[in-house]
Image (cartoon, rainbow, N blue to C red):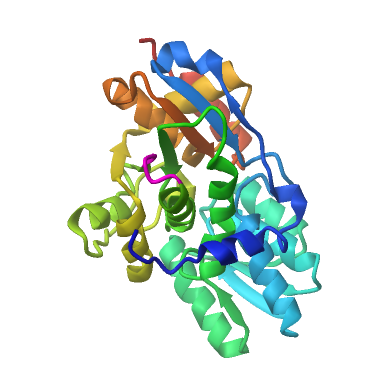
Amino acid sequence: MQKTRLDTARIRAARRVIDPIFLDTPLYRCEALEPDLGCMVSIKLETANPVRSFKARGTELVASLLADNGSRAAVCASAGNLGQALAWSGRGRGLDVTVVASRFATAAKLDRIRALDARLELVDGDHELARERAAAIAQHDGIRLVEDSLDIETCEGAATIGLELVGTVPSFDTVLIALGGGALATGVGHVVKAMAPEVEVICIQPLGAPAMTHSWRRRRVVTTDSTNTIADGVAGRRPIPAVLDDLLLVADDAVLVQEASIITGMRMLLEHAGLVVEPSAALGVAAILEDRDRFAGRHVVTIVCGSNVDVAAYHRWVGAAPLHRS
């Protein structure tokens, strides 16, 4: 494999820094999903932790480095999950954390950021505007700007999931990864391609937020003017060039799925796996639903990456979605 920015030795070392509460998350076959999906399905559950997403694997590395260097403050832009994770990791190490988010972000995520003692600043725009504001704060205050997916710690923290996947029994043929900024996809993809290159790495985005997928397909950065998806955790418009370069080396495919399939995937994870998940976490199931023939006969692992969801919105989505039947 050609070299990405990531380093497997550093990823192994990361496990010694990350709080064990975020490591060795459940991985299990979910037979109840299989009749509707037509393939063997295993779930890697990244929601059973204090911030209910995989993001703290990366923020644990960031916060540890900052504390070791005597830094006392950091700022990030977040759709919600990174902000919670950085707030949690920073609080445990005595860091002052500022999170910039869109005023239209999921209210439950914003409430949790506040509850974790972070300073929250809201902008009247989308995540890209929040990124610009966070960068301005970092420059003005002279503090660390934590940039999800660009900062290698966020990718290598996520990559520890890959270490937990490879070498499992029974082995799997395909891993399905939600694609937003790219930390999860490039992190897990790096480890899988380095240690189990025969496994297909497939990244999934919503049709309403396709920038990184279009960029992967065209092998150059493609931006969009807007997004239109309930999967707020992956709704970016401006891919980071360095992250795209890594993704091009580790992803075998990048696919787009419809909103109806995302909602059906959320409902199936509730009904068949007992899991309440946010839309981004259902992208893997949505990809199988839209192309059953492709996955027939395979053993597929889907990473359930987050469960921070607005309860009222969740009930609207899941209650309205007819269950897909094969």
Q: Nearer the viewer, residue 25 or 313?
A: 25
Res. 45 image quadrant: top right
Q: Nearer the viewer, residue 202 or 173?
A: 173
Residue 287 shown left or right of residue 192 in the figure: left
Give the x, y percent position of residue 32: 54, 14
The residue positioned 68% from the left and 58% from the top of the image is 15
Q: In the rendered view, would you say 67 is above or below 122?
A: below
Residue 286 shown left or right of residue 30 in the figure: left
The residue positioned 62% from the left and 34% from the top of the image is 311
Q: In the rendered view, would you say 148 is above or below 54?
A: below
Give the x, y percent position of residue 224: 27, 58
Give the x, y percent position of residue 290: 30, 26
Q: Which residues are magenta?
A: 196-200
Count of residue discs:
0
Q: Nearer the viewer, residue 276 or 273?
A: 273
- Secondary structure character of the magenta stretch overall: loop
The residue positioned 72% from the left and 61% from the top of the image is 16
Q: Is residue 94 magenta?
A: no
